[in-house]
Image (cartoon, rainbow, N blue to C red):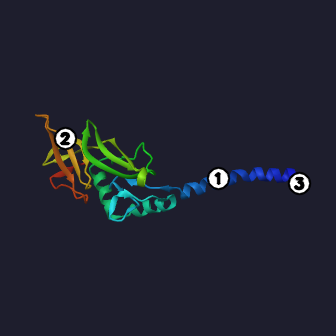
Amino acid sequence: MSVITAYLLGLATLPAGVAAGWLLYRLFRRETWLCPYCLEWTAHIKGRPDTALHLPAVLTWASVLVHGRTARHRAWMRAHEEYDIRPADPTWGFRPDRLTRAVPTDELDDESQTYLLEWGFGSERESRKEPVEMPYADCLFDGKRVEGDVIRHEDGSMELLTVRHSTEDPLRIPLFDGNAEPNPRIKPIERE
């Protein structure tokens, strides 16, 4: 084999080597994923669904597939779809492969709810409070139409924060408990 042929063969295999390196990086870098419906990390520390377990990406993707078939996830997804609620995603605009916790707080600011985000491990652990846009819901409460922002609590329950039209007192109506069981006094608006 001549030197020129060996050189051209080496150049031809260079893109394949780069692609193989990129694929290995994508498969085995450590990451995690937060389900926006049940606000639970798909891979989490046993007994602590609010604390992420960072795994190689291929295992995280497998845990996302398994999580999508759990009864808890299906119940929360059905609840969001039935009441046409867009899930709040605190990891939007943040690198979720660095986060370890995303906990909703009771601090509200206009159209946002504050989430406590924690990242890092050991002595390098840091946290900050980040505003997350609240989803909007429109439903029937005791036969009357109500609409407003949806607040998520740390225990998983959700509340509808609406304003009465006669006074400016906020009305807090529990939508779901922590197990995605709806409030029997609230019904979705029938869609055609």
Q: Residue at x 64, y 56 (%)?
A: 20
Residue 19: mark: 1
Q: Residue at x 17, y 43 (%)?
A: 145
Check disc 1 and report its element: helix, strand or loop: helix
Mark toward the start of the polypeptide (2 vs 1): 1
Observer-nearest of 118 and 156: 118
Residue 88: mark: none
Q: What's the residue type where badge 2 is placed?
A: Thr
Check disc 3 and report its element: helix, strand or loop: loop
Quadrant location of the N terminus? Answer: bottom right
State the CA–CA distance, disc 2 to disc 1: 52 Å
Within 10 Å of disc 3 (Cα), the crowding (few <14, some 14-19, many 20+) is few
Mark toward the start of the polypeptide (3 vs 2): 3
Horizontally, residue 183 falls left or right of residue 80, namely left
Residue bearing mark 3:
2
Q: What's the residue type where badge 1 is placed?
A: Ala
State the CA–CA distance, disc 3 to disc 2: 78 Å
Q: Are marks 2 and 1 in contact (CB under 8 Å)?
A: no
Question: In the orientation shown, which residue stands out farthest toward the front?
Answer: 123
Q: Residue at x 44, y 55 (%)?
A: 32
Q: Quadrant of residue 94?
A: top left
Question: In the orientation shown, which residue stands out farthest toward the left?
Answer: 166
Residue 162: mark: 2
Q: Position of residue 147 (x, y in %)?
A: 21, 41
State the CA–CA distance, disc 1 to disc 3: 27 Å
Residue 55 in view, yes or no: yes
Residue 134 in view, yes or no: no
Query: Which label lies toward us, 2 or 1?
Result: 1
Check disc 2 and report its element: helix, strand or loop: strand
